[in-house]
Image (tube, rainbow, N blue to C red):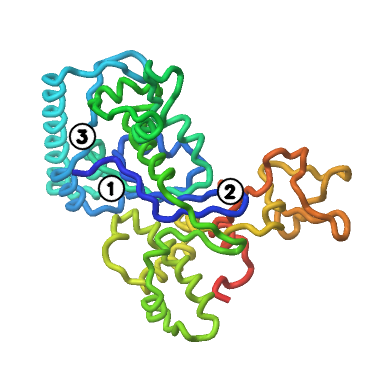
Amino acid sequence: MTKISAKIVADSIDVRGNRITSYILTYPRMIHAEVMTHRMFSRNAASSRAIPFDRMIKMIKEDPFIPIAWQEDHPGMQGVKYLDPGFAMQAKQEWLIARDNAVLMAEQMSINTHVTKQLCNRLVEPFMWYTCLVTATEYYNFFDLRSPKYQFPLFGDRIFKSKIDVTKETHFSNSLSDIDWLLASKSGAEIHIQALAEAMWDAHNESRPQLLEPGEWHIPFGDKMNSESIAQAIGFKTSDYDWYNKELWSRIKIATARAARLSYLTFDGEINYQKDIKLHDDLFTNKHMSPFEHAAQCMSELQYFSFVKGEYPTTEDQWGIVNYEKYPIIKKPMFENEIIGENPNNGNLHGWCNNFRGFIPYRYIIENSKNNINE
């Protein structure tokens, strides 16, 4: 049975402590809108438009999403009472009857009218599990808003974001039921997104990010790629001149294609690097750019103090002026041999490129490069 989960597929950190993490997330389709509200995330997710109808129906029949708990009817957005076991069992049975009815109507519509899967699949979305690749450098606002806030009188005002934290920090015996844990959380977030945030929080704390030097790359799924297979796919040899650059760009292209393949739920299936590289090139040609946002390059010192979040001051009594001809937000030294440092008037604004800090998304590079990326 599928459960809400978070698996890290790449985790990197720069010398300043900026950390970029890519997750494969599994959660119920019904909370995807809440995930989408976090605009610091780069995302690619399974698409109801792309998944074949027969495959969608098979997933819904064999492994539907079922709520983790059944709250009583309540005013406002967040309930605090849960159904007794007998009523909870009845609610589950009626949920599955609703699933069966939705599947029946979707199948009849598909067979009788030959309506596109884009519409038939929509009828069963409430019972669907969703797979999403998320990459970001800024997760703490998400954790603050969406994580559980476990509180117990025994520990005063202390707030814990996960059951693991409670156990590690207090040696509190984990003998509570699922409902007890839900009642202990004072978070205002919906219970399923709380479960997702908790899974992400625990994975984030357990992972040890790889230290990247300036110019090195964060590449989701990169550690699973085989150099010999990449060489065969691109008609190169690992001993050839310039193999490092060829392999690097191939890995980035493959990672980009894998992000795009989430729409079809096939990235864990057939491994064909030639098809991945071709898909990357097709995506770029057709300007489907969201899959290009997950791989990212670690900033150099100059880049870090050139990229600025928001409007950069350009008056003569500030640190410098903006070279709008080359980049809209790059900073030049005002004087020869000037050390470019953090502008005290800017606060915490340096090092931002789009929604990442300390890292330049591949999308930014490929959209702003005048040169062939393979050169």
> Which disc is residue 118 wearing?
1
| Mark 2 or mark 3: whose residue is earlier in sequence | 2
Query: Can the viewer see residue 193?
Result: no
**Crowding at mark 3 (Cα within 10 Å: few <14, some 14-19, many 20+):** some
Q: Residues within 10 Å of mark 2 (few under 14, many from 20)?
A: few
Helix, strand, or loop for circle 2? loop
> 368 and 82: which one is in front?
82
Q: Amino acid at mark 2?
A: Gly
Number of marks in picture: 3
Q: Amino acid at mark 3?
A: Ile
* Label 1 element class: helix
Q: Which residue is mark 2?
A: 17
Work out how far the residue at label 2 is from the one at label 3, CA to CA, in angstroms. Answer: 39 Å
Q: Is residue 209 left or right of residue 2?
A: right
Q: Position of residue 257 (x, y in %)?
A: 40, 63
Front tag of 2 and 3:
2
Q: Which mark is residue 66?
A: 3
Q: Is residue 316 left or right of residue 132?
A: right
Residue visible at 37% across and 65% down in the picture = 224
Please say if 280 is above or below 91: below
Closer to the chain start, of discs 3 and 1, is: 3
Q: Secondary structure at mark 3?
A: loop
- Cα distance between the residues tagged 3 and 1: 23 Å
Distance of label 2 from label 1 (alpha carbons)? 43 Å
The numbered mark, 2 or 1, whose residue comes first in the sequence reads: 2
Quick one: 336 or 279, which is closer to the camera? 336
Q: Residue furthest front?
A: 171
